[in-house]
Image: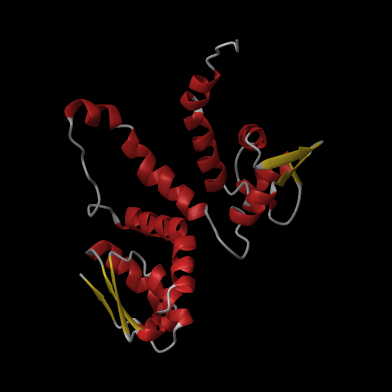
Amino acid sequence: MAEVTPDPIMGIAMGFMAAKHLFVASEIGLFTGLAQGPATLDELAATCSIPRRTAGISADAMVSVGLLERDGERYRNSEAAAAFLAGQPGPDLRPMLRFWNRISYPGWLALEEAVRAGTGRAKFGQFSTEEQQIFSAGVEAFSATTAAALAANYDFSRHRRLLDIGGGTGSFLLAVLRRHVALHGTLFELPGACEMARRRLAGEPEGARQPHCGV
C-alpha cells in the first residue's frame, strides 16, 4: 500500500510563492536581461538595477521552477522563458503576468470574505488609467492564440462588416482584418477599454478599416 504523504497539499498551498516569484522576475526584467545570452549574477543585478543579493534570490527561484538554467556562475533563460518572456519577436506573455500580478492576484485576497458572505465585489469598469492599460494588455496577451485561431479557421470572406462586442483592445478584429482586406470592423466596448482600443488601433494599418469604437 502506497504511503500517504502531504506532498499534494503542500504543492498546492505553496503554489502562490512560485507564482509571485515569476511575476517579480518578469517585472524586474530578469528574462529580458538574459535575452542576449548567459550572464553572471553581478551582470544581472546591474541590468535589473537591483541588489546582488535579491537578484540571486529571484534568479535561483526561477532555476528551481525550470525557467532559468544555471551553469557555474552564469544564468541563462530556459527555452520557454526565451520564447515567451524575454521580449523576443513572437508571443509575449509578460503583459499577462503583469495583469495577474497587479489586477487578478489582489482580488483573490478577498476570496474567503466573498465565500463567507456569498457576494463578490466587481471592479471591472472602475479601473484607473494604469490599471485599464494593464488589464487590456494582459487580456490581449492571454487571448492572442485564440484570436489567431479564429482568424485562420473561419472564412470571413463571405462578409463585408464585422461587429466585435466586448472586443477589448481590438486584437481579434486586427487578426481577422489582416487576413481579409475587404472586411470592415466595428468594436463595441466599455469606455475605459474603448480608449485603450483606440490607441492600440491607431498605430495599425488595419485601423483605417475599423472606423468606430463604440460605447
In the picture, measured across the screen, residue 185 lies left or right of residue 191, that is: right
Q: Residue furthest front?
A: 1
* Residue 162 found in image quarter: bottom left
Q: How many marks?
A: 0
In the picture, measured across the screen, residue 146 lies left or right of residue 91, that is: left
> Quadrant where the N terminus lies?
top right
* Residue 139 found in image quarter: bottom left
Image spot of residue 176 (x, y percent):
43, 76
Residue at horizontal 44%, vertical 66%? 147
In the depicted structure, whether residue 138 falls above or below residue 13: below
* Residue 117 found in image quarter: top left
Image spot of residue 197 (x, y percent):
34, 69
Image spot of residue 126 (x, y percent):
22, 52
In the depicted structure, whether residue 165 falls above or below residue 45: below
In the picture, measured across the screen, residue 137 lies left or right of residue 90, that is: left
Residue at horizontal 49%, vertical 72%? 152
In the depicted structure, whether residue 103 falls above or below residue 215: above
Closer-to-camera residue (89/184): 184
Q: How is the image coloured?
A: secondary structure
Residue at horizontal 64%, vertical 42%? 67
Image spot of residue 173 (x, y percent):
38, 73
Closer-to-camera residue (21/52): 21
In the depicted structure, whether residue 148 falls above or below residue 119: below
Residue at horizontal 18%, vertical 31%? 118
Q: Residue furthest right?
A: 72
> Quadrant where the C terminus lies?
bottom left
